[in-house]
Image (spheres, coloured by chain):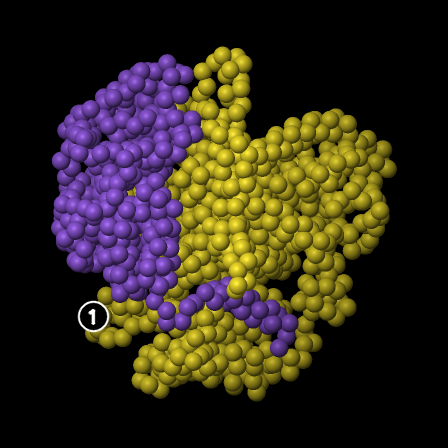
Amino acid sequence: MKTENKAFAHSTLLLWLIVGWAGFCLVPWYGIEDGFFGFEWLSDGYPFDPDYAPALFLILQGKKIWLASVVPFMILPVIALFRIKSDPVFGKVLVVCGALGFGILLGQGFIIGLKGWQFGWLEQLFGPLGDRQFGMGYGALFMASAFLFIFTQGIAARGAVNGDVFVVSSIGFVVTIVAIFVFFPIISMLLSAFIGEDKAYSISVFIDKITDNRLWSLSCITGGQKCGAAWNSFALAVLVGITTTVLGLAFALVVTRTGFRYKKLLRAMSVLPIITPPFVIGLAIILLFGLSGSFTVFFSDLFGFQPTRWVYGLPGILIAQILAFTPIAFLVMIGVVEGVSPSMEEASQTLRANKWETFVNVSLPLMRPGIANAFLLGFIESMADFGNPLVLGGNFDVLSTEIFYAIVGAQYDQARAASIALVLLFFTLAAFYAQRFWLGKKSYTTMTGKGDSGVYSQLPSRVSKPVFLIVAAWTAFTLLIYAMIFYGSFVELWGVNNTLTFKHYITAFSARIGEHGIHWTGSAWDSFWTTLKIAGISAPLTAAVGLVTAYLLTRQNFAGKNAFEFGTMLSFAIPGTVIGVSYILAFNVPPLELTGTGIILVISFVFRNMPVGVRAGIASMTQLDKSLDESSLTLGANSWQTFINVILPLLKPAILAALVYSFVRAMTAISAVIFLVSAEYNMATSYIIGRVENNDYGLAIAYSTSLIAVMLTVVALMQLIVGKTKIGRRSGQSGAKP
Amino acid sequence: MNTFGKITLGFALALSATSASVSIASAAKLTLYCSAQEDWCQLMARGFEEASGIKVNLTRKSSGETFAQIKAEEANPKGDVWWGGTGDPHLQAAEEGLSEPYVSPMRAKLNGWAVSQAKSADDKTIGIYSGALGYGYNADLLNAAGLPVPACWKDLLKPEYKGHVQMANPNSSGTAYTTLATIVQLFGEDEGFEFMKKLHVNINQYTKSGSAPIKAAGRGENTIGIVFMHDAVKQAVSGFPIKVVAPCEGTGYEIGSMSLIKGGRNPESAKKFYDWALSADVQSRSLEVKAFQVMSNMNAKSSPSAPDLSTIKLIDYDFKKYGSSAERKRLLKKWDDEVSVLPQ
């Protein structure tokens, strides 16, 4: 890196200068109402029409003069082009221009909005502005990116992170997007937690709301009354976290360390619940265990007791969440269990430890990061889950639904919603720190660059027997649920009229061939195509951002790393309902006007699911010895080449996990989506919830079944494309894995 | 250009590619926020497209959610018309200046209650349908559990119905708020809240959506659901074993409303839709989707299965007072503090 030649560094700088100037002179500065991809403006008055004009043309026409304030910071970096990189002036000029340019660009957007000055004191100071501006568009985006990367090149030139441009730029990029799409909406949301009835900020309002008895009441222990939503959520999340971790570990062990014959089936099956739209498991549980559910009726007839609504509340949510989140634990655990080098276990056995001692003293401790991660994910997922409590909650209030009610209700109490979100955040952050504390500072590195061989040792029988039992029970239950779902999509009216029919599929997915090609006449096509498109775009973005972040966290040292990690994890700890509303609040008005577009859906998915990519990446990367990077760097590769050619190929399981997870989450998410869908961009889950509300279970289940089929296909394709990692030398023995 | 530069540029481009090209150059458009049932919303949207050639973007959400959305988008409205949903949030929107006054030429052909709804909100909203509150029960479950047949509001307080009654949460549902306001107007505030407290003991769940209790009853997941009668009728007509009850003490009603969103981007299309939606032909089509409300146009057809408002004892519902946000907040807070926290 230090041998990087001058021309190379300067060509990057030149590129970003060109991008910046193009943003200023060539493309429309403001957002275009037809959407980012509508190109009518090219033939519609461009470049002089004020709606489509680039900033330069606006200023020349005497409009939006304030945009000229960024120009000096685009001109000055030209000086740097004529300096060598080690010249202090090079770094200084770039840092100053990048930072000021970026700051002014954003600042003018926040200061001048739809109604002129955004702040009363500015109006008093300067008088009414007499002009206004809309949301930023291509031009602003180009220029902001240019300023950002000019800034990071300056920082790198001044010696940060050994002057590594790739690392510094990556950090700058991740920090910027996380700040804009995670912190900015949350801050605007949290500010509203302090706003009282009179629209003034007040701390007492905040304290009142955060200590609300409805959240913290413990009367269900002392008396017979309901407990607060905070305790309910906490108890539920702990139960779900523990159970899913145990199940996930059991699955991972069975798949890697036993001679079990149907591993393929297990792997495929464990993916099933995760590719299921959230309401479907809840619906199936109601149809089986509800007051008139098949099971309930059967057993109440058999034993002659009065059916009850026991499934509504904690039991129902617990069952549904365990079904839904075990696969997440499995996806985390499998990477870790596979990553524990067999040579360590062989060493232990060579030293005369028996299988049980090896398992307890060597294998299990090495799986600790995975166990902690799986628990953390289960805990947070359960806390943030919205769909299952909504369908099955009964009167068991949890925080995520309380937030939703505080927002959608006629009370429309954003302040209350924000304060409940804070409580939720407190729990999830506590879980996060507990996990860090437990993991401590031990080294879990077992995959080294020094070559590794061996086969995974088999489980000791006192572990394998209970593990088999658990896996078998879970498998049977899951199969039953899915059989019911599949069957349910073919019956006329569940429980009332059990005639078999294709009518739900026809209503949803009919198509006929007309003179202009295929007519998609089914009612579900619109939301189906949108969902597919949005999920397909957000999955690779999520994986990319997540893995780059994981790489920075595990492999690089830089100031503020802890804050950086906190920031990238934060979006996972914030429930979707809050993200949804905070996005509406933050991105409905200039300078960043995104509501009603597909972009806002993609962005919400990327940042909501990014932590899983990060976690999966970290879990795998902590097991790759640093000597691998070092040897690559010693051989003259730069950090970008090392990342692409050495780290990434070893991370295939993590990449797959991130891709699969983010695609599937994008297709099945509901909590944030319900606020962000628009007429033009309606998502499948939001369509299905409408059908469920309408008692149209047949159509809802038929649609969900089709979604499951689509996701299965896509997941299988991704497996095929990304492929299976080969990190052991004896590849022959892993034949049972897909 | 180094590889990293390519990647970041690629990211930006990919991000921009997402807002794909569903734009119709210069053709007239309309964004419709609909708070009625999905198939009715679809019928209105597609029907208007056929009748006018204007492309309709439809978003269906409950009236509470739609109100929240319109309020959140206040500075930069995305919607043009808000059609359907109980009248209170519409009145609230009018009161908070989120909707636009408009006097439709169709007004002369409307029922008195629809016009008075408009007048009480300075022409910022108008009645499109009305329906009376009541409850329905699942006859099969009632028989199986050996319970008596209820006929009045006060019957629901009987201890034998414990765990059998369901209503929506007044915080999230206009229907349930109408129930609360009706009980308060019917029995007076103190006695009304006593009623709600006793009812609370029998409630098995407060649902999110207003019509969910009767749908649960239809599927056999609940015995009695407090809902608008037309929702109960719909379940009965769909083949579920539901019986509809008009409570003997009298009952309140809602006026499903329509508002023009202030600052909408397509005001001309919005007004066209507004007039079109008030015509008799369009309102008669509500029967196609089993919407059994009484429509506001005097010439609109009604179904024989629909509850006849003239035979039901209706209270003199004070929309102005109970639709105002101050009164609403007060009642909801009181309900939250005094009723919802009680043991069951």
- Position of B139 compared to A77: left or right? left
Residue at x 75%, y 59% (from the top left corner): A628
Q: Nearer the viewer, residue A360 or A227?
A: A227
On screen, B34 above or below B233? below
The percent coordinates of residue A380 (x first, y second) are: 51, 42
Q: Position of residue A434 (x, y in %)?
A: 54, 40
Q: Residue furthest top?
A: A304
Q: Position of residue A499 (x, y in %)?
A: 53, 32
Question: What residue do we see at 44% from left, 54% from top?
Answer: A682
Q: Quadrant of residue A364?
A: top right
Establish if B188 lies above or below A694: above
Residue at (68% x, 34% y) in the render = A250
Q: Secondary structure at mark 1?
A: helix
Quadrant position of residue A46: bottom left
> Quick check: B259 left or right of A722?
left
Instruction: Look at the image and tell me whether residue B289 can be seen.
Output: yes
The quarter holding residue B251 reads top left
- For label 1, the residue is A124
What chain is colored yellow?
Answer: A
> Badge 1: few (under 14), some or many (20 or more) residues near its Cα, within 10 Å?
few
Residue in view at x 53 percent, y 53 percent: A511
* A690 or A224: nearer the viewer: A690
Q: Which chain is purple?
A: B
Q: Position of residue A32 (x, y in %)?
A: 40, 71
Report the amino acid beneath label 1: Gln
* Chain ID, mark 1: A
**Residue A734 or residue B159, whichever sits in front:** B159
In the shown orientation, is residue A154 left or right of residue B44? Answer: right
